[in-house]
Amino acid sequence: MDDVCRLGRAFEYYDILTSVKYNRNVEAGRNLYYEWKHCDSLAFLEHFLQYSDDEEYLKHFDEEYDNLFFNLLVMFPDFKLRLKQDKKTHNAELTAEIKSVFDIAWYTFARMVADVAPPADVDPDYEFSQGSILTCMACREYFVRHSSHQRYCSNPNYQATRNNCKAMAYYKRKKASTE
């Protein structure tokens, strides 16, 4: 039960931080703390309750946001990583060593937080410029991924390769389902 509480608290805290920071939802921050018979929430935002005015609340929240976000990051457990070879691409990949369902949940949550972590400089095109760096499966060049399913760069010369692989995979799936 302790693992569920720790994960739930961290996710709830992340959700509240993003809600207050990006949606300016002050009520979410004010209602974060609660007590439950199995576990209590964390009191990270409790000292902001002294600000009854929403603008003042947001001003102080924005000033302390980096520290609040750091409080979230230290809640994550350490992950053991190892190199493995991808059977499809034959490239070496860095993967997390998973021993329980909670490891999967924490790792997935960590990837989510890292993928949408706030930029160092506030950039109006941030949501379009952020992503993971991958190697294109066609040309082996590095590119910034814009979707969790993207495996090929956006170079038009390699779109035909991507489309052919996609069609071949569809054909194999369809053939396997009819057999």
Image: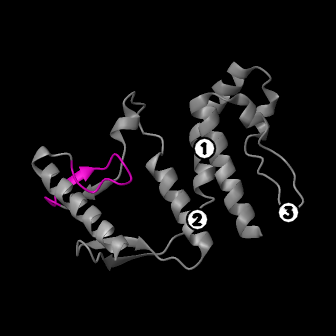
Dot 3, how many residues are within 10 Å of its Cα: few (below 14), some (14-19), or many (20+)?
few
Please state the horizontal and vertical placement of residue 98, each as a whole percent of the image. 52, 76
Dot 1, how many residues are within 10 Å of its Cα: few (below 14), some (14-19), or many (20+)?
few
Q: On the image, numbered disc 1 is attached to which residue?
A: 67
Q: Quadrant of residue 109?
A: bottom right
- Mark 3 vs 1, N-terminal side: 3
Q: Looking at the image, which residue sits at the far right?
A: 37
Please tell me the numbered disc located at residue 156.
Answer: none
Instruction: Give the answer, above or below, for where 121 lies relative to 179.
Output: above
Instruction: Give the answer, above or below, for where 91 lies relative to 170.
Output: below
Q: Secondary structure at mark 3?
A: loop
Please identify, in this view, whether the residue under mark 1 or under mark 2 is nearer the observer: 2
Q: On the image, numbered disc 3 is attached to which residue?
A: 38
Q: Residue at x 47, y 52 (%)?
A: 114
Q: Residue at x 72, y 36 (%)?
A: 29
Q: Residue at x 19, y 54 (%)?
A: 163
Q: On the image, numbered disc 2 is attached to which residue?
A: 105
Q: Amino acid at mark 1?
A: Asn
Q: Quadrant of residue 127?
A: top left
**Magenta residues, start to end:** 138-153
Instruction: Give the answer, above or below, for where 136 lies relative to 116.
Output: below
- Residue 175: in magenta span: no
Q: Amino acid at mark 3?
A: His
Q: How is the image coloured?
A: one colour
How would you classify the magenta stretch by its main secondary structure? loop
Disc 1 from disc 2: Cα separation: 24 Å
Disc 3 from disc 1: Cα separation: 27 Å
